[in-house]
Image: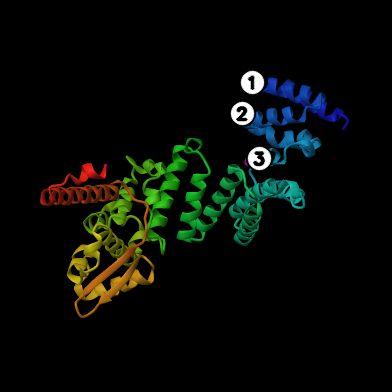
Amino acid sequence: MQVDRDVTIYLSKTKASAPADLKPHFAAFEDLYDRKLWHQLTVALTAFAALPSAAVYLVPLYDEFVSEWEKRMNQLALVQYAAKASRTIKDPKAALAFLEKHAARLRDNKDAKDAYVLATMEAAHMRLVTGDFVGCKAAIDESEATLNSLPHSDTVINAAFYRVAADYYKAKAAYPLFYHNALLFLSSVSLDDLSAAEKHERAYDLALSALLGDGLYNFGELLMHPVLDSLTNSPSAWLRSLLFAFNSGDNDAFEKISKSADFLKMPLLVSSLPFLSQKLCLMALMETVFRRTKEDRGRLPFAAVAKDTRVAVHEVEHLVMKALSLGLIKGSIDEIDQTVSVTWVQPRVLEMGQIKVIRDRLAGWSGTVKEKVLSLEQEGGVDISAAAE
């Protein structure tokens, strides 16, 4: 490859007019390009693109400089550069065209499937911005199939995929799918890379989806995630408290929060009160089963369930049947004796209060075992603990 004279002229002129802090970067581009050090040039370009003051140069730099040697670049690095450049384009349709050009160039490159997925998902984001939901969903489906075929993928690609997928399902109000993809996005990035505003927004959206998601009865993972701390000491702190109330089946806390001014300002939650009430009852049922010993679960009176879940005794059977059908518990109902036998409760990620229950239960079990050992020693006159050693 011959050094393009037009490229060197462009770099020289741009360097002359650039701010003082950017001049060394353009000088480095000239030197590395002249020496054909493509890897070092890619590294230098990536560092340049990360500078806030470089934003206005990204698109023209691609058109006049990068496009001349882009085939020699690491293709993933090239797409990451193009993605940053696209965010400086004010017209979403123009930004989409810019990104689609890169995706089209990589479509048949078997050695750059990861870069193709990244370009496709960045373009899918712009499709979402322009209201092309069909095109966005098609890109998500195609990229998911490609990712599943790869032995491994970079976290940058995973983050881009889950970010766009979460945004799509949020726009479609598909709460369970949003919840799933939003958590996977957070697992693919460092929270330190997100602004305070973005952390708050993601925590807020995740909290709402956990509450409103049909089939979401286990959101301990969210409760233990540090992103939820962004709601603490904020106007949305009540939403965090509401999540914890649901997770522990706390009817009193739910009733108090549902009557608060903050809750009543949320038409989406107010209109969903019947659904939320039933969901809370189911989670209260899971919690009351979880907190009982194996022996107590074997014969749980309707009256005890009614007390803990705040439903009428005649509604307990229906509540338990609902929990059984959803796979939240396993067991049987004795209509004659008005009891419930639970053999299994859906595993959950536990928050600290629930972990304390297990700890106390283990401590109690340990104490019982110790008492029995001591009793046997006294009855038989043998030091069992010493014999065991």
Going by the numbered disc 3, the residue's amino acid type is Gln
Going by the numbered disc 2, the residue's amino acid type is Ser
Tell whether label 1 touches label 3 (CB within 8 Å): no
User: Magenta residues: mostly which secondary structure?
Assistant: helix
Packing grade of label 2 (10 A; few <14, some 14-19, many >=20) is: few
Upstream in sequence: badge 3 or badge 1: 1
Label 1 secondary element:
loop
State the image coordinates of residue 19 (x, y, percent, origin top left): 66, 22
Q: Nearer the viewer, residue 87 or 326?
A: 326
State the image coordinates of residue 188 (x, y, percent, origin top left): 53, 44
The residue carrying mark 1 is 21
The residue carrying mark 2 is 53
Packing grade of label 3 (10 A; few <14, some 14-19, many >=20) is: some
Left or right relative to 357: residue 61: right
Q: Nearer the viewer, residue 275 or 110?
A: 110
The residue carrying mark 3 is 80
Going by the numbered disc 1, the residue's amino acid type is Asp
Tell whether label 1 touches label 2 (CB within 8 Å): yes
Packing grade of label 1 (10 A; few <14, some 14-19, many >=20) is: few
- Range covered by the magenta-colored residues: 81-88
Placement of the N terminus among the 4 image quadrants: top right
